[in-house]
Image (cartoon, helix red, strand yellow):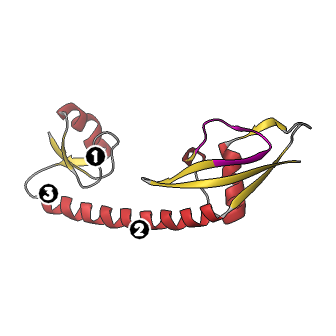
Amino acid sequence: MKVLLRSDVRGVGRRGDIVEVKSGYARNFLLPSGAAMKASSNTESQASSMRKSRDSRDAASREAAEAQRAIIEAQSLSIAARASANGRLFGSVSEADVVNALRTATGISLDRHAIHMTEHLKEVGAATVTAALYDGVDATIKVEITAK
């Protein structure tokens, strides 16, 4: 069944796309939830206007993410944590700690899931962390961990 997506559906398509899906998936999920509508010959113009608005919104979001990346990469975050005499932290610095320090230093609020660490930071010193701001726009965050 051909449907016009009214919102982004993971694994299916983006808003404004006309896609072919199984009829049961369309009848039981996409159509009742309002995520899609049946595609017909008249919906092509509606699909093109949806794609146009989606593209302009994506361009604005990408520009905003680029501006945030410039601000984030210019900063060096300092996080104080309890540590032993040899520099090992009693706990660890997690994604949430980095998000809180970033919000305090720059005013930029990110979701903790946007922060990517191979593992939590467990020692005093400098480290780098990446943040996914937008699709294809990643920022490198410099973090300096100090002992309390």
Secondary structure predominantly adopted by residues drawn in magenta: strand
| Mark 3 or mark 1, earlier in chain | 1
> How far is the residue under mark 2 from the one under mark 3?
26 Å
Place of residue 88 in the rendered image (x, y in percent of width and height, measured from the top left): 83, 36
Place of residue 41 in the rendered image (x, y in percent of width and height, measured from the top left): 7, 55
Disc number placed over residue 43 in the picture, else none: 3
- On the image, which quarter does residue 142 sit in? bottom right
Q: For the residue labelled by badge 2, is the local secondary structure a helix, a strand or a loop?
A: helix
Q: Which residues are magenta?
A: 116-128
Closer to the eye: label 3 or 1: 1
On screen, residue 38 versus residue 115, left or right, reads left
139 and 10: which one is in front? 139
Q: For the residue labelled by badge 1, is the local secondary structure a helix, a strand or a loop?
A: loop
Relative vertical location of residue 119 with respect to residue 124 in this rendering, above or below: above
> How far is the residue under mark 1 from the one under mark 2?
20 Å
Tell me the residue that label 1 is attached to: 13
Tell me the residue that label 2 is attached to: 60
Q: For the residue labelled by badge 3, is the local secondary structure a helix, a strand or a loop?
A: helix
